[in-house]
Image (cartoon, rainbow, N blue to C red):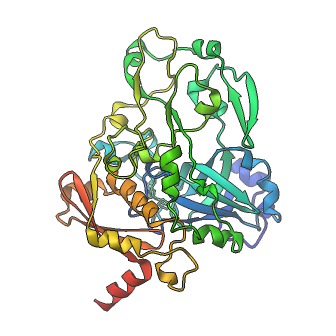
Amino acid sequence: MHSQKRSSGSWSECCTRSSLESGNIVTIPVGYIDSCFSAKNGTPRQPSVCRLSRACLTINKSVFNNPEHCLMGLEQFSHIWILFIFHKNGHLSCKAKVQPPRLNGAKTGVFSTRSPHRPNAIGLTLAKLEKIEGGTIYLSGIDMIRGTPVLDIKPYILEYDSPQNADLSANTHNEQDGKLESRYSQEAVDVTHNWDAPDKLQSSKTRPCQSQDTFSGSDCPVSKSNRDKYLDRENSNKTELGKAECNVQRVDITPAMTQSQRSHPVTTADTHLSQDTGGTVGEEKSMSIQHEQFSEFQPVQEQHVPAGGNFTLSSSVPPWVRNSSVANLQVRFTPHSEAEIKQFKAAGSPDAAKSFRYCRSPEEMKHVITTILSADPRSVYRRKQCQDRLFYFTVDTAHITCWFGEEFVEVLQVKPLEASRDAASSV
Ligand SMILES: C[S@@+](CC[C@H](N)C(=O)[O-])C[C@H]1O[C@@H](n2cnc3c(N)ncnc32)[C@H](O)[C@@H]1O
């Protein structure tokens, strides 16, 4: 498979029938991610780690002359699958066995993991669709870095994409907020087939849940040109998070829950259902970020399914995915770093170097940093072998310096990216 960057020819010119049949496929990215993460370091390992991580995706006009045509109808979905290329892997080779962080150094087959190092280097992310404007899609809850080539976009459809819903009939459909909703009847839920072994049925599982995302922020600013507005954050001085504190609800699935509630994938960002390079399903973690103003975010409750119960899950994951030793670190900020975060301004201010592009307020930036660090973004090697406890990463327009202690991580410095570059070059 060859990926063609910013092709001059059209998609149809490159993808002939014979090439499809021979498997010699030329891919042309449908667009490129513009993300709040510019480097792999510190980028969440799965979209669920940080719900406030944002990105834009603009459809490439060489694929569709009128990008808005191909996006027609997509706005009716709350979440979308994004297939992309791990273009910063460095090389195409991959090993049959890999060491996902959750296995803490042990190996497993690459196909049992979400490792970026895999044949064809294709990634799959379930992102929240904030809004669409023209040919641009605004996303949140992402784990892709800036410049990531996107191969395809598909709607997330609970009925197709979740085995939990196999054999359940979606018996009513309602329009609400422009999104299609469907409901389960109690009866429908009761007839869920149990195909798991009985012992599995008794084990605790993490339920899908819905978290109403009221980060009105969905108002992904789009262009100042609409797009630039999105990146700008005119309202960064207002705490959007404050609104969320009032409105975010976390609901566990119960048999009587509506399908629409189920149909929203676990928006676990702030619950720290963090997922590793190798993980496929989040592990419930206690919340160090609850200490502060984010106490409204409750972890998804695991439920014990009684043997013979009438509500069973029809998917399972190996214990290492859930019973991971990956820590839930307490995140601290020095007074100095707190003050530095507060110096960031809304976009459009004269001091552009100190303006956010994605984060809507200093509080939001603090929250993003907290969720990323709490999940411990370090590699196993770094965590276990390196003496160096300092860690650097970027979010939005900020360069963050922190250090890891035992069970905690402390943020030391949050500098504007430009300033941090200047400081580094003057050393
Ligand atoms: C473990 S992968 C999971 C991605 C996707 N959710 C999946 O399951 O296929 C996520 C990590 O890939 C890395 N990454 C993100 N975008 C990338 C890119 N364009 N090239 C290479 N690595 C990337 C980041 O380090 C991020 O933490």
User: In the rendered view, does 179 fall on the left or right side of 422?
Assistant: right
User: In the visual, does 28 lie left or right of 117?
Assistant: right
Quadrant housing residue 189: top right
Left or right: 349 in relation to 318: right
Furthest-bottom residue in view?
426
- Whether residue 383 is visible: yes
Q: Position of residue 202 (x, y in %)?
A: 38, 16
User: Which residue occupies 38% across, 56% down?
Assistant: 372
Q: Is residue 423 above or below residue 282?
A: below
Residue 378 x, y percent position in the rendering: 31, 57
Q: Percent x, y for residue 194? A: 52, 14
**Any part of residue 99 in sight:** no
Camera-side residue of 298 and 152: 298
- The residue closer to the viewer here, 161 or 137, is 137
Quadrant of the image containing the N terminus: bottom right
| Position above or below: 68 against 326 | below
Q: Residue furthest top?
A: 308
Question: Eyeballing the image, is 134 above or below 77?
Answer: below
Front one among 14 and 215: 215
In this rendering, the answer to whether 411 lies above or below 343 is above
The percent position of residue 174, horizontal first and vertical second, equals 75, 31
Could you say which is closer to the camera, residue 43 or residue 268? 268
Residue at x 62% of width, y 65% of height = 32
User: How many labels were placed on the picture?
Assistant: 0
Residue under the point 53% across and 44% down:
247
Quadrant location of the C terminus? bottom left
Which residue is pictured at 68% across the width and 46% down the height? 154
